[in-house]
Amino acid sequence: MDKVEINSLTFDELKEFVVNLGEKSYRGEQIFSYFHKNKKVDIGELHLLPRDLRESLKDITEVRKMDIFKKYFSKIDNTVKYLFLLDDMNIIETVVMEYKHGYSICISTQVGCKMGCSFCASTKEGLIRNLTPAEMVNQIYLAEKDLNINISNIVLMGSGEPLDNYDNSLKFIDIISHSKGHNISLRDITLSTCGLVPRIYDLADENLPITLSISLHSPFDEERRKIMPIARRYSIDELIEACKYYVNKTNRRITFEYTLIENVNDRDIDIKELGRILKGVKCHINLIPLNPIREYKEDRPSRKNIERVQRELMKYNISVTIRREMGGDISASCGQLRRSVTQNNK
């Protein structure tokens, strides 16, 4: 019989689990806080539990762990990138960024990715597997312990598509925000998706006060299909309708991520069409200068052109910012570092 991955259980699941073992429900609370408040991983050291219960849990459960494989410190802005080694020897990456308001962490939700976005290094080797909730939270706990910091903002924007790992991503959010654990505010969690339309509707119906971030990258279906294969399944009209539903359901502003690619999606016609399709949508646009990778030959626009795009979009009464680039000297963008390591090990 497969063992239960105990540190992937939500608070309610853990209480139910121990009750089914004949224990009082408060034992589940003790175990949950041990993992998710104290950031411990050795169930044998949880001395609040009776010895026989600890021994029983060792037999029927497993604790998902990971180790720091490598870490890189940016000399530019104190960004730290981690490569974590999983139990099955896969590698994932995580980025910690320091801001005036505190520390943000960008975590991975899958090993690899199957979405196939042309300029993203995460997807070049395809999807290997989903991460479990424990593997998601452990990225945060290991980074916090290693740097002796408290993370104040969490972004599901690393390797992988969170809505393609929907159930585990929701369980992660439940675990990391629970008052008996890490207790981070849901409003300080951002989930980024390339646009899985049915799942956007599902997420809206969860009515969680998280921030939803949509990778848009072009206002034209034909151009977006060249950049993002997901656009062959869902048109921009379908995507925008789903976004409107999300806003109406949650009353939360959506962020549209827009990677600027020179002479591809930074033209006047792109700006005009963006203004048209986003009219009346409660949203914000985050302009991201392209981070070139070997497999994608297009260029990033000049800083002058990036600022021009921002100015023109703001004329449509849309909130627009240019993403501050972090950790440029340590390949801090999605998948770059992990891919360089896995390629070198082949």
Image (spheres, rainbow, N blue to C red):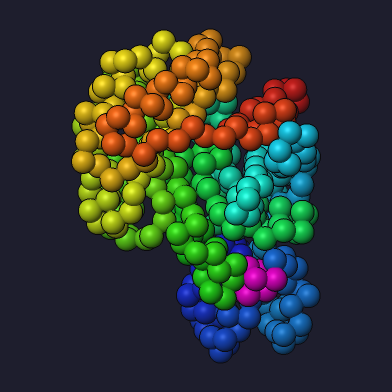
Side (left or right) of 40 relative to 8: right
Residue 298, given in percent of the width and then of the height, sits at 50, 11
Image check: 169 left or right of 36? left
Q: Tell me where residue 12 appears, x and y as whole percent.
A: 48, 75
- The boundaries of the magenta stretch are 32-38
| Residue drawn 35% across the image and 45% down it | 254
Identify the residue shown where x is 59% and y is 18%: 293
Q: Quadrant of residue 180?
A: bottom right
Q: Is residue 242 above or below residue 259?
A: below
**Which residue corresponds to the image point at 71% horizontal and 38% vertical from the top-left?**
77
State the quadrant of the C terminus. Answer: top right
Q: Position of residue 334 (x, y in %)?
A: 58, 33
Q: Is residue 187 above or below residue 227?
A: below
**Is most of the magenta stretch helix, strand or loop?**
helix
Query: Visible in this render: residue 192?
Result: yes
In the picture provided, is 49 more to the left or to the right than 334?
A: right
Position of the N terminus by quadrant: bottom right
Q: Position of residue 243 (x, y in %)?
A: 27, 43
- Using the image as rendered, state which of residue 8 and residue 332 is in the foreground: 332
